[in-house]
Amino acid sequence: MAEVTIRDVRKSYGAVEVLHGVGVDIEDGEFVVLVGPSGCGKSTLLRMIAGLEAISSGTIAIGERVVNNLPPSQRDIAMVFQNYALYPHKTVASNMAFALRMRGMEKSEIKARVGRAAEILGLTPYLDRYPRALSGGQRQRVAMGRAIVRDPQVFLFDEPLSNLDAKLRVQMRTEIRELHQRLKTTTVYVTHDQIEAMTMADKIVVMQNGHIEQIGSPLELYDRPANTFVASFIGSPSMNMLDGVLRRNGDGWTADVNGTSLPITAGEGVEEGRQVTVGIRPEKLSLADSGLEGKVSVVEPTGAETHVVVETGGGEIVAVFRERHQLRPGQPLHFMAAPDAIHLFDRATSARIG
Ligand SMILES: Nc1ncnc2c1ncn2[C@@H]1O[C@H](COP(=O)(O)OP(=O)(O)O)[C@@H](O)[C@H]1O
Ligand SMILES: [Mg+2]
């Protein structure tokens, strides 16, 4: 196992820079998820760790060793892709053994490693089958088996679950997590899916347009997003964002939103007249007699909870209730949120205040 240290890494394709100086410290044994919208540079960064893309500037180290100029085969990493491309004419056992055979490893050692990986992945009964006789989830497990048998210092995953149906995706994400708890191999996992990031990561790296927006544990990002991008990207449905102005109000402070004064907690950066974006998570809104005012436009029951879309003078907001309120489209409503549930962002820079 090993830590991975990424320092001021840049990547250009011709004249176009797609990664603009990225730094991440990945600890030994940590499960780190790179998450962000399509095209933000996740795969490029992962492929640079793997050695499949050259590094334009900066350094990447695995353990003590700077690997910038090492070929992939000498980096002691194993990568699992979305498109896992098993050899169709080889059995499950041969697919898993292939890289070890190429390395010239002893037959008995190969057999032991494949047997152990199959055991971990629940593939023992399928070792003699061909990929066509496996389900999508089983094939993805074989792809992980190929990585596990190599016993690498670092696992790299690039959207490995994107080809699976929704239910299997949920199941496989638990399996990968369990696998990590068992093997404790340093892992870098790329996804565009914030739920995958939240449920799997020890540490999340949120990226946008070749920049890192924030690094933190899932709940740190959820509770204290550094800017409106992270606030909107993490959490589903997304955090509601409304324009507001901060006002001193007697002994306390309010954020005034579309004619409603919402009490807020005083803190650093809270100043009279400051133009802000007020962020409130949908599950932090509760029905009240006064407060933010709007009209129900859509009611979406999911079973466990109900999503209610509300038109307000300041834009559309979404509330999530676990209780089963009887709400109809067109119905007028008022909402409140506790002061500590209100996030404030500078309107101009979009950075968190306080
Ligand atoms: N071989 C390449 N040549 C030119 N541009 C590329 C190449 N590979 C990726 N890019 C660009 O780099 C950016 C990041 O791509 P990528 O790392 O694949 O994003 P992600 O994995 O986050 O969806 C995108 O704008 C993409 O178009
Ligand atoms: Mg990608």
Image (cartoon, grey):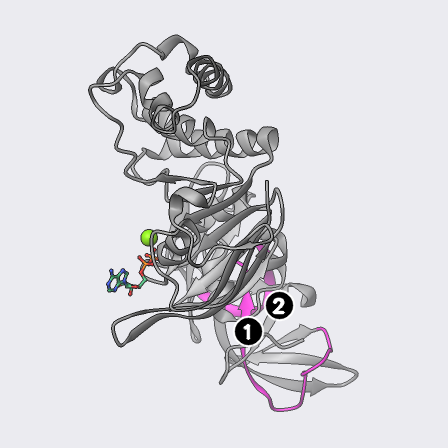
The quadrant of the image that shows the N terminus is top right
Question: Is 199 colored magenta in this rendering?
Answer: no
How far is the residue under mark 2 from the one under mark 1?
7 Å
If you read the primary sequence from the N terminus, does the residue marked by circle 2 or circle 1 appear first? 1
Residue with the mark numbered 2: 342
Point out residue 327 in the picture as x, y percentages from the top left corner.
45, 50
Q: Name the residue at 42% across, 14% down.
A: 107
Q: Nearer the viewer, residue 128 or 246?
A: 128
Disc 1 marks a residue whose amino acid type is: Val
Is residue 327 in view?
A: no
- Residue 135 appears left or right of 109: left
Q: Which residues are drawn in magenta?
A: 265-294
Quarter of the rendered structure image containing ligand 1: bottom left
Is residue 205 in view?
A: yes
Point out residue 332 in the picture as x, y percentages from the top left corner.
46, 63
Question: Is 286 colored magenta in this rendering?
Answer: yes
Point out residue 48 in the picture as x, y percentages from the top left corner.
40, 56
Compared to residue 117, the image places residue 200 above or below, namely below
Q: Name the residue at 60% across, 32% down.
A: 181
- Helix, strand or loop under label 2: strand
**Mark 2 touches mark 1? (CB < 8 Å):** yes
Residue with the mark numbered 1: 278
